[in-house]
Image (cartoon, helix red, strand yellow):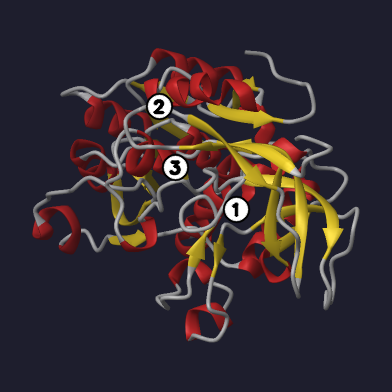
Amino acid sequence: MCDHCGKMQGATLPGNSTVEMKEFEIPKPGHGQVLVNTMASTICGSDIRAIYREHTGKGAEGYMDGMVAGHEPCGINEEEGPGLVRFKKGDRVIVYHIHGCGVCHDCRMGYQISCSSPHRAAYGWQRDGGMAEYMLCDERDLVLLPDELTYCDGAQVACGFGTVYEAIEKVGVSGNDAVLVVGLGPVGLATLMLCRALGANKLIGVEMSDERIELAKKLNLVDEAFKPGPDTLEKIKAATGGKGVERAFDASAADAGRQLAIRAARQWGKIAFVGEGGTVSFNPSPDIIHDQKTIYGSWVTSLARMEDLVERLTRWNIHPEDLITHRFRLSDADKAYQLMASGRCGKVAIVFDGTENA
């Protein structure tokens, strides 16, 4: 930030696998708004898929050229606008990354992610996001970050961990269940972390990357880990007494990965798709209908469930920050996005507190 000119640097994504740093005015909060001093902002796989490599997103995923990137921010309220109801200067906050219209049915349920109004705007997509020192936020998009959680914990709550928690709530996970997670990127690792906390009796991961398998093992998030191959389904069945798993999650967004999640689920099993993009093909009768299986889709979560998740992370003493393998300063955002795009890492964060390690 330029203390004397009211300017700040922000990272934008032109859509050609590069990052452009631009100068922006530090915004002033209006009615019902706060100026958040960003402390951590993590990079999501959807940033890479739909913006960084190429601007492929449409509608809700359509990136407006020149917007400050980053839809996984966390920080501290720096300045209050008039008309605030709950939040105040100095509060540590997580930002729900979709600002919905507030009056449609989905918004009134707290699922701003599903708002279909033309007034819907996502931070880091259609309004400035968290890859800058400051960001302008509406009060109703904030969730309080408790002192027990770090800013790097909070940055991952709204999108990755929120999506996973929503999916877990839909399918239900308990100590009765063996769980399969296909794709051990940050979303897959988050799935394992929460399922472990909920008492799943066996956790099985499938992943191509040696680095991500090693990270899952290092964090004690898997009991079994397999690389995808022609005998992977048989290995999963063997690890579950020939039955298959009660719950399966696909975070790979790959056709073969989704097929594996479906076919590795046992009779009456439940499957959740949380990986964005891609396609899937399967044979409905033998793969789903005859074995009475159910497939769920899950996209982010609601504001209320985000607050529930924050409470549970604190109660379970779980720290999403453990998934972060690399931290960069904002001036090195190009290196951060390049690394995240390579897939040879866990979660990647931009930090503003001097704790960068890359």
Instruction: State the separation of the CA atoms marked 3 and 2.
Output: 37 Å
Q: Return the residue nearer the eye: 150 or 115.
A: 115
Which secondary structure, mark 3?
A: strand
Q: Identity of the amino acid at label 1?
A: Ala
Whichever of labels 3 and 2 marks the residue nearer the N terminus, that label is 2
Q: Nearer the viewer, residue 315 or 346?
A: 346
Q: Is residue 132 left or right of residue 44?
A: right
**Residue indicated by mark 2:** 18
Give the mark nearer the N terminus: 1 vs 3: 1
Labelled pair 1, 3 in contact (Cβ < 8 Å): no
Q: In this rendering, which labeled residue sits more in front, label 1 or label 3?
A: 1
Q: Is residue 209 left or right of residue 83?
A: left
Secondary element at image label 2: loop
Which of pointers 2 and 1 lies earlier in the amino acid sequence?
2
Question: What amino acid type should be assigned to the residue bearing mark 2?
Answer: Thr
Considering the image in quadrants, where does the N terminus appear? top right
Res 50 quadrant in image: top left
Image location of residue 203, percent across then percent down = 48, 34
Drawn side of residue 326 relative to residue 82, left or right: left
Who's the residue at 63% across and 38% down the image? 41
Q: Could you tell whether 146 is left or right of 231 in the image?
A: right
Where is residue 294 drawn, in percent x and y?
Answer: 30, 62
How many neighbours does mark 2 have within 10 angstroms: few (below 14), some (14-19), or many (20 or more)? Answer: some
Q: Which residue is mark 1?
A: 158
Residue type indicated by callout 3: Val
Q: Nearer the viewer, mark 2 or mark 1?
A: 2
> What is the x, y in percent for residue 333?
55, 26
The residue located at (21%, 58%) in the rendering is 291
Residue under label 3: 179
**Residue at the location (83% across, 37% down)?**
3
Residue 107: quadrant of the picture:
bottom right
Local packing at callout 1 (Cα closer than 10 Å; few below 14, some 14-19, many 20+) is many
